[in-house]
Amino acid sequence: MSQPVGWRRICTIDMRLMLFGTSGCHLCEQAEVIVNACVQDGVEIVDIAEQEQWQERYAIRIPVLYDQESGRELGWPFDQVEVEDFIDRVVL
């Protein structure tokens, strides 16, 4: 299993998909590995500690995969199949 790269990294899928989490969260690290296996160009990794509104909304729910265009969310727990289904529904 590859190692997560970090919660401040931003990749390039036209910044439509965001993965909300925070540093030191082992579930968030697991989610990043799963999401990166599904999305070749990556997603925007968002540390909820950077914005109070994100802390209020996601503090007890992270990790959460979020599609900015549709507003849909996929909350933890999820696996690779569930992430692929989510992406099929919102992106393709």
Image (cartoon, grey):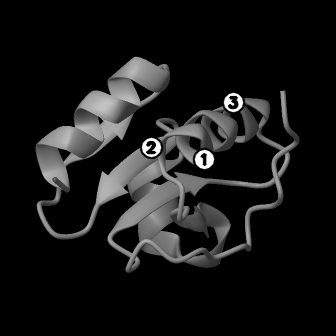
Coordinates of residue 42 in the picture (x, y in percent): 55, 62
Label 1, label 3: how many angstroms apart (C-alpha)?
14 Å
Q: Amino acid at mark 3?
A: Leu
Task: Residue at 40%, 77% (x, y): give it.
Answer: 15
Q: Which residue is mark 3?
A: 27
The answer to whether residue 39 is left or right of residue 10 is left
- SS for callout 3: helix
Coordinates of residue 14 in the picture (x, y in percent): 38, 80
Question: Quadrant of the rendered structure where residue 45 is?
Answer: bottom right
Label 2, label 3: how many angstroms apart (C-alpha)?
10 Å
Whether pointer 2 and pointer 1 mark residues with C-beta atoms closer than 8 Å, the reply is no
The answer to whether residue 88 is left or right of residue 41 is left
Q: Amino acid at mark 1?
A: Asn
Q: Residues within 10 Å of mark 1 (few under 14, many from 20)?
A: some
Coordinates of residue 17 in the picture (x, y in percent): 37, 62
Of mark 1 and mark 3, the one earlier in the sequence is 3
- SS for callout 2: strand
Q: Foreground mark, 2 or 1?
A: 1
Q: Residues within 10 Å of mark 2 (few under 14, many from 20)?
A: many
Look at the picture and state if 57 lies above or below 77: below
Task: Residue at 41%, 47% (x, y): give it.
Answer: 65
Q: Which residue is mark 2?
A: 64
Whether pointer 2 and pointer 3 mark residues with C-beta atoms closer than 8 Å, the reply is no
Of mark 2 and mark 1, the one earlier in the sequence is 1
Of mark 2 and mark 3, the one earlier in the sequence is 3
